[in-house]
Image (cartoon, helix red, strand yellow):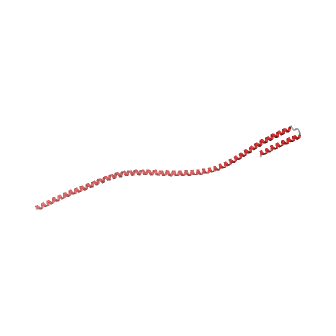
Amino acid sequence: MGFMQRDIDFKLILLVILVIMAIVGLTLFYQSSAGNIIQKYNKVTENLEKAQENLSVTQAKYDACTVRMNNLTTELESATEYQLSAQSEFNEQYTEAQSDLEQTESTLASTQAELSDAQEDLEQAETDLSTCQTTNQENIDNVNNAQSYAASAENTLDNCDTCSDVSTCVTCINSAKDAIHQVNNYLDEVEG
């Protein structure tokens, strides 16, 4: 029995050594596997932290862009309202200016027609004035001639006072009548 006892002890020792080796192997395997897992975990944790930082930076940029987009949207709406208001005001002013232009063109055409009529009237008045001046000069000449004939008739009548005989007086009176008749003719021309 002693042999069996030794054989069992040896088997137990061998079993214990195998268990210890298995534990050491499993420990080494676990340590190796766990070390890789821890390294991967640390890398993933670092990557997650970097991703978190990038996400925070991106979120801040996104928030800034959102604020800027809201500001730009507000400015765009304000600019659009201003443009619509300015366009409306321009259209009103254009319509008013167009109406004023049409009215001014109408007034200008009317004024040009009146000016043309006035020029025709002026030309007629100048023609009439020229005719009147000519007629007036003729009348002045006729009055001067009439005065000359009247003076001649007066001289003839004065000469009649000194007539010595009747025939000379009759001739003198006839000359005076002719002179008076010429004066009457000139006076008739002046009146006409």
Residue 28 to residue 191: above or below: below
* Quarter-of-image position of residue 26: bottom left
Q: Position of residue 38 (x, y in %)?
A: 27, 54
Q: Nearer the viewer, residue 170 or 104?
A: 170
Q: Nearer the viewer, residue 163 or 96?
A: 163
Q: Position of residue 173 (x, y in %)?
A: 85, 41
Q: Nearer the viewer, residue 12 or 154?
A: 154
Left or right, residue 129 beside residue 38: right
Q: Position of residue 130 (x, y in %)?
A: 71, 45
For the view shown, which residue lies furthest in the top direction?
A: 162
Residue 162 to residue 61: above or below: above
Q: Residue at x 68, y 47 (%)?
A: 123
Q: Position of residue 105 (x, y in %)?
A: 60, 51
Q: Residue at x 33, y 52 (%)?
A: 50
Q: Residue at x 44, y 51 (%)?
A: 72
Left or right, residue 130 beside residue 41: right
Tag count = 0
